[in-house]
Structures are given as C-alpha cells and as structure tokens.
Image (spheres, helix red, strand yellow):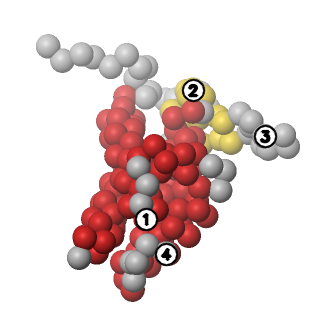
Amino acid sequence: MEQEDFVDIFYVPLVRPLGNLVILFAQAEWALTELISECDSVGESAALEILKKRDARDVAADLVSRSGLTGFDLAETLEHLDQFWTDKEKRNRYVHDDWFVNIFEPNGAAATRGVPRKKGANVTWDDPKPEDVWALAFRFREHRSVFSISAYKIRKERRE
C-alpha cells in the first residue's frame, strides 16, 4: 500500500516537484564537485572544501576558465555555473523557509516566508507554484548534465 502524504492538502501539489528538486539539486551539486575536482586535479574532499568557501562561485569560475575547456564548452559551463548559484538561492528558499497556508488566497494556497539571517535583510515572501518548482528541478538536471560532461571532457583531455 502506498504511503499517503503527511502534509496538509494545500501542499500536496508541491510534494512531487519538491522531491524531484531535492534529488536533482543533490546530483547537480555532486556533479559540480566532480567538475571542480577535475579542474583543480584534487580529490573530492578538497573540491568540497573549495565549494564551502564564501567565494566558491568565483573560485569555481576561475578553475573552469583555466581547465582547458574552450569555445562552446567553456561558455556553456561558465553559464551553467553562474545560473547554478542563482538557482541554488531559490532552492534554498524552498528548503529552508517557513511554509504556511496563505488564508488570504481563495481556498488557501501554499506560501513561504524567509526570515532574514543577515542584519538589515528583509523578509522574503513567495507563493510557489508546482510549475515553478518543476522548472527549477529541470534546470538542476541541466546543470548536472553540463557539469558531468565537462568533467568528463577535462578528464579525457588530460589522459590524451
């Protein structure tokens, strides 16, 4: 027998897209780790340390720029790197923000509220729609593919 959802009915349309988002983000993040590992010729642990730094976005872009990738491959990888961090911010909102039911919407609707963690930041409000979460999950699938292919190309070039 299939397990019923634990969440309130207002959230049910978001359960599948959020589940896909969680898995595809984790896969994209791991593919990025593999890419950094290949670019810098370091092990996974060292690549993870690079990605934990405050300036990880810039460091990753610099490593990819010096990786030996050229032309379209370089441009596409850099574009996905940049978009990855933008998408990661949105993903973090869905994963870490407070979820509630917006009673001011007809029949209620799922909404999120992000409490500021930095001094002077504002509360962030959102009303996620399933199609928005699906689109974000799709982008992480694309990031995963580009990072993985780029890592493979760097590894292959190094062997030749």
**Eye-nearest disc, 3 or 1:** 1
Q: Earlier in the sequence, mark 2 or mark 3?
A: 2
Residue with the mark numbered 2: 100
Q: Secondary structure at mark 3?
A: loop
Residue with the mark numbered 4: 66
In three-dimensional space, the C-alpha distance between marks 3 and 1, rounded to whole angstroms, equals 33 Å
Q: In the image, what residue type sits under mark 4?
A: Arg
**CB within 8 Å, label 1 to label 4:** yes
Q: Earlier in the sequence, mark 1 or mark 4?
A: 1
**CB within 8 Å, label 2 to label 3:** no
In three-dimensional space, the C-alpha distance between marks 4 and 3, rounded to whole angstroms, equals 34 Å
**CB within 8 Å, label 4 to label 3:** no
User: Which residue is more in the foreground, 136 or 47?
Assistant: 47
Residue with the mark numbered 1: 39
Q: Position of residue 135 (x, y in %)?
A: 39, 54
Q: Secondary structure at mark 4?
A: loop
Q: Residues within 10 Å of mark 1 (few under 14, many from 20)?
A: many
Q: Position of residue 143 (x, y in %)?
A: 38, 59
